[in-house]
Image: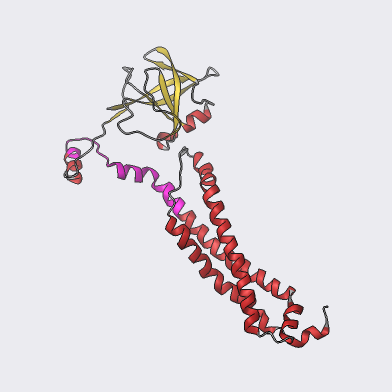
Amino acid sequence: VLQTSSYAAILPDGETANLTVEMGDHLVFPVSFSAGVVPAGNDEIALSSLNAKEWNLSVGDTLRLLMDGREADYRVCGIYSDITNGGKTAKIGAVQSHSPVIWSIIYVSLNKSADRKQWIEQYRRMGADVTDIGDYVWDTYAQTLTQLRLASKGAAGIAVLVIAVVLVLFLRLMVERNRYEISLQKALGFTERELRRAYFARGLLFVGVGVIAGLALGNLWGEKLCGMILKALGADGFHFVIHWGQVLAGIPAAALGTAIPAIWAGIGGIRQIRAYECCRGKE
């Protein structure tokens, strides 16, 4: 059983702040710690990342709590991510107070043969507030996950647009800069098909290098950049789940599917260049 109560925390500068503390055996439903470990001793406390950042506390520091009219010192043993209750919570390893309990939580694991929905409804009819862990996680992170999906779709759309626009403009500029050389090659007998094929291969080379560089930088720095944003919300232990099928096949296929027509459009100006233009000399 985990019990949650509110206590006054005495900060290093002497000020006090209300702190929501969860007490009990946290190994029953462990959370991931971005630093340190779960509280085990009677004098240990774990802080949410927002609390630790706001109070400038780290693992090994001491935090004083006012419990049952007396002061008690606790050593910060861990820091974890939390976006519930405003992201400002704490965990103590054992129930050490007789203060009023705000709420209590009991974690229950059902056998595979048990009917989960029936079990939940049965206890709800008895007056208990029963929440499925999967539903709780979704309700807690639904808005964040929805925004991330929307951002990923928007980023994908912008990336496709940027690839198309940049390739068309870049290749048109390349064709125009090489107008004299292209005209000379036509005068020497090179066909328009051969020239278009050469510039098409050159464009694909640029796309290939860009896709490889983008995937490498995205996997190396993408998680850190998103983590910096989510860290402000209290989600300090943010990690990407990489689907290698999409990374190695889906994204390159989408990039090439956009690049091929863009390259053909960009090198379309080759057909407008005449063989006799080289006789005029460079302007």
* Residue 14 image point, x, y percent: 53, 17
Quadrant containing the C terminus in the rendered view: bottom right
> In which quadrant of the rendered view does residue 9 lie?
top left
Image-based side of 198 in relation to 126, left or right: right
Colour mapping? secondary structure
Residue 277 painted magenta: no
Residue pictured at 75% horizontal, 78% vertical: 181
Q: Is residue 116 left or right of residue 69?
A: left
Q: Where 224 falls versus 90 (above or below)?
A: below
Residue at 35 percent of width and 23 percent of height: 93
In the rendered image, residue 68, in percent from the top left (x then y), is placed at 36, 14
**Residue at 49% of width from left, 42% of height from top?**
230
| Front position in the image: 203 or 105 | 203
39 is higher (above) or lower (below) than 125: above
Q: Is residue 167 above or below residue 248?
A: below
Residue at horizontal 49 percent and vertical 65 percent from the top: 254
Q: Quadrant of residue 133?
A: top left
Q: Which residues fall within the magenta stretch? A: 123-149
Locate the N terminus by quadrant.
top left
Query: In this orientation, which residue lies closer to the viewer: 252 or 10?
Result: 252
Q: Main secondary structure of the magenta part?
A: helix
Q: Is residue 137 magenta?
A: yes
Quarter of the rendering containing residue 196: bottom right
Q: Position of residue 224 (x, y in %)?
A: 53, 44
